[in-house]
Amino acid sequence: MTLLPYQDSDYADIAMGIYAAQDDYVLNYYKWFLCSDAFDDCLSPEQQKTIISFVDRVLKNSSDLNHLIDELHRCEDWMVQQGISIPLWRTSTAYHVSETIKGADIDSMGLISFKKLWIKD
C-alpha cells in the first residue's frame, strides 16, 4: 500500500489531508484542538496561552471523559462565537481511495480506520 499526501492523490492507493487514530476520540479531539493549524494560525500567542491554561484546568478537574469532551467543545464554541475560528476539523479530511482498497468506510468523524482496510486481489 502506498500512502502519499492528498496533493499527490493521483499516484496513491490512499491519500488524505490529515491522519487521526480512531480508537480514542477524546485524545484525537484534544490533539486537534491544541496542535492544529487553526490553533496556531487563528489565535494570538496570548489567546493560545489562555486556551491552554483553560484546557489544563479542565484536564485536572474533569471527572470523566464525557465532561472533558464537553468542555473542549465549549472552547471550540467560544472560538467560533468570537470569530476566531471556524470548526473545519470534521470536514477537513479528504480521501482519494483506489478501487483495489476495500473497507474504506468513513466514520461519523469523516475518518477512515486503517484497521478495517484490506486490498482486493
Image: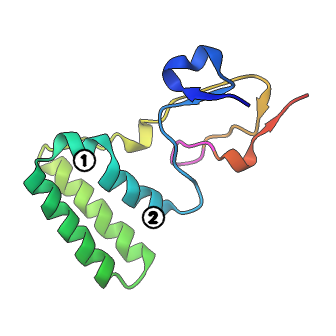
Q: Residue at x 31, y 60 (%)?
A: 73
Q: Give the residue type that dot 2 points to.
A: Val
Q: Within the magenta stretch, is there residue 5?
A: no
- Vertical order, 91 against 14 (above or below): below
Task: State the extent of the magenta-drawn residues as a range.
Answer: 107-112
Q: Residue furthest right?
A: 121
Q: Position of residue 91 (x, y in %)?
A: 43, 37
List the residue tagged with mark 2. Answer: 26
- Between disc 1 and disc 2, whose residue precedes? 2
Q: Position of residue 45 (x, y in %)?
A: 11, 51
**Horizontal placement of 5 versus 83: left or right?**
right
Q: Do the residues bearing badges 1 and 2 touch, measured as CB atoms within 8 Å?
A: no
**Horizontal placement of 50 versus 65: left or right?**
left
Q: Secondary structure at mark 2?
A: helix
Residue 41 position by quadrant: top left
Q: Residue at x 10, y 47 (%)?
A: 44
